[in-house]
Amino acid sequence: MRQYEIRFASYNNELYPKWITALVIEPERTGPRTGAMLFSHGWGGNRFLLRDRMEYTCEKFDLVCVGVEYRQSGYDFDAVTGLGAFSPYDASFLQTLDVLNGLRTVLASRPGLDRGRLFHYGQSQGGHIALLSAIYAPNTFAFVYGSSPLTFLGEDQFRWSGRDFSAWELSARNVQEHAERIRCPVVLEHGTADPFLPWKLHSGALAERLRKLGKKVTLKLYEGGDHAFQPTITKFEAFKKLAPGPMRKLRNRAKDDFLAGSVIEIPCAGTAVRIDWSKPAGSGEMVRRQ
């Protein structure tokens, strides 16, 4: 395996892009079946925190693995410890765009990758980002995987973020509200004793909503497990149980949104968020509110 970092410009405003760093782990040799998988860390984490899953996935499943350290977290917040988050905090809107722009950057540098094998795993807030990525780029992934995921912002997230959110901002971050826009299979896992993100409110409610919509969803519960599934199992072992099947079997048959240059419009509380994937990652014109 080869490990290196990339730095790229992500959407910020018309004058100044936001520079983002990502960890990339890729096979020594790539071939026509080599795909790519995003790994999104949680609130205040950094690009190295999911390296165990990235290394395992790269080696076993012929995937270029990308861990994007999205804005306001990790080393962007604290250059020494790599832990913590700014306040006020974005809470997954611009941060989801950062992660998707990281994947775009890798795909542009590796034009031979199999774009039918694009996957996304995230834990906690990273699970929120993975699920939102299937809404913001609905034709792109063969599956997304949320581990103890946040699915909407509640009172705890308002407090942690240190800010208020308008109605459209809450809507743009609400996976359950926009679940009908998800086109790929969804894998969810949660501990039943999670004190931070109660499973019934997040993974349970989302799984029920997806099933009612006729979507493909898997929900795995760890009885008595906390936010990290302790003392039942580790996150890494849980990943090794649940991820291999979808990674081996699932493919996306559509042209992904980046290649197609799709324009995605998401209705949000009387307005709409418009994401134009034909624009460069650092372009101030990539996102508009209608």
Image (spheres, rainbow, N blue to C red):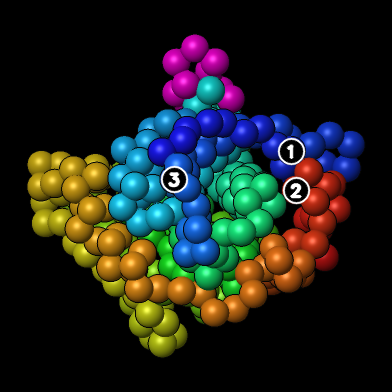
For the residue carrying disc 3, how many other residues have a C-alpha within 10 Å: few (<14), some (14-19), or many (20+)? many
x, y percentage for residue 236? 24, 45
For the residue carrying disc 1, how many other residues have a C-alpha within 10 Å: few (<14), some (14-19), or many (20+)? some
Numbered disc in front, either 2 or 3: 3
Q: Which mark is residue 9?
A: 1
Three-letter residue code for mark 2: Ala
Instruction: Out of 51 and 2, give the one closest to the viewer.
Output: 2
Magenta highlight on residue 77: yes
Which residue is drawn at the image coordinates 78% and 55% (left, top)?
Answer: 287
Going from the N terminus, do you reach mark 3 or mark 1 first? 1
Three-letter residue code for mark 1: Ala
According to the picture, the residue beneath numbered tag 3 turns out to be 27
Kind of element beneath mark 2: loop
Compute the Cα span from label 2 to label 3. Answer: 25 Å
Instruction: Out of 175 and 109, give the one closest to the viewer.
Output: 109
Compute the Cα span from label 1 to label 2. Answer: 6 Å
Q: Quadrant of residue 208?
A: bottom left
Q: Kindly check if marks 1 and 2 are in contact, taking CB atoms under 8 A apart as contact.
A: yes
Three-letter residue code for mark 3: Pro
Vertical arrangement, residue 232 with respect to residue 211, above or below: above
The N terminus sits in image quarter: top left
x, y percentage for residue 142? 47, 70
Compute the Cα span from label 3 to label 1. Answer: 25 Å
Q: Quadrant of residue 223?
A: bottom left
Which residue is drawn at the image coordinates 11% and 51% (left, top)?
Answer: 224
Which residue is drawn at the image coordinates 72% and 42% (left, top)?
Answer: 10
x, y percentage for residue 79? 54, 15
Q: Which residues are magenta?
A: 76-84
Numbered disc in front, either 3 or 1: 3
